Amino acid sequence: MSNWSTLEELYSLYYEEIFTYLFQRTRQKELAQDLAQDTFLKAFNGLASFKGKSSVKTWLYTIAHNTFITWYRRETKYSKHPIEKTSSLEQRTYKNPEEVVAQKAEQAQILRAIDLLKEDYKTVLILREYQELSYDEIAQIVGWKLSKVKTNLHRAKLELRKHLCKTEDDTNEV
C-alpha cells in the first residue's frame, strides 16, 4: 500500500493537501477542517473497500470531493464569505510591504473571479491549478471522462479570464 504503513502515516501524509483543497472550496477554515476530518473518517472506515485501481491520493481526493458536494447540496443557505475573512495580510516571507499588499489584492481579485464561476468550472480549476493534480486524477475524482475534464478546464480558464478582464476594465473606469 504505497509509502505508508499505518493509518496515522496516511493521515499525516495527505491531511494538509486534503484540508487545503476543502478550504479553497469552502473558504471557511473550521468547515474545511470538519470536512477533512469527515473525509479521513470515511476513508478509514472504507479502507477495506479500496481496490487499488487508483492511487491512495486520488482515492482520498475523490472522498473529499464527494464530502464537499454532499455538504454543498445539504447547505440550504450557502452564503459567500467576504474575502477579508479568508485571506489575511499575514506576511510569511520578508518582502517589500507594498509588494505583499499588491500581491494579496491580486489574489483576492482572482478568488472573487473564481467564486463567480459555475461549480464544475471551480472544481476542475482548483484541482488542476491549486492542487496540481493530473487530468487523469481529476477525471477519477469527479467521475468524468478525460475529455470533459479538459473541456471544462479550458472553459473555466476562459471564463476566469473574462471575469478578470471585466474587473480590470471596471477598475480602470474609476
Image: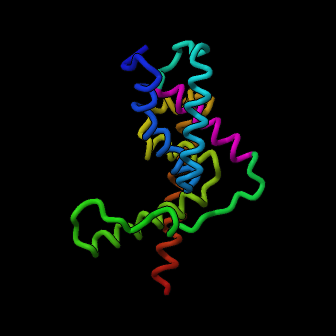
Q: Position of residue 63 (x, y in %)?
A: 59, 31
Q: Which residue sits at x=69%, y=47%? A: 72
| Closer to the camera in the image, 108 or 14 | 14
Tell me the chief SS of the magenta region.
Answer: helix
Quarter location, residue 142: top right
Q: Where is 162 relative to 65, above or below?
A: below
Magenta span contains residue 58: yes
Figure quadrant of residue 67: top right
* Residue displayed at 60% across by 56% down: 117
Q: Is residue 87 visible?
A: yes
Which stretch did the figure color magenta?
A: 57-73
The residue lying at 50 percent from left, 62 percent from top is 86
Residue 85 lies in magenta, yes or no?
A: no
> Which residue is rendered at x = 39% and y = 20% of the image?
4
- In the image shown, does 133 or 39 lie closer to the viewer? 39
Tell me the quarter of the picture where residue 50 sits.
top right
Q: Nearer the viewer, residue 169 or 32?
A: 32
Residue farthest along the bottom direction in this orientation: 174
Is residue 80 left or right of 129 when viewed as pictured?
right
Point out residue 85 in the picture as x, y percentages from the top left corner: 52, 66
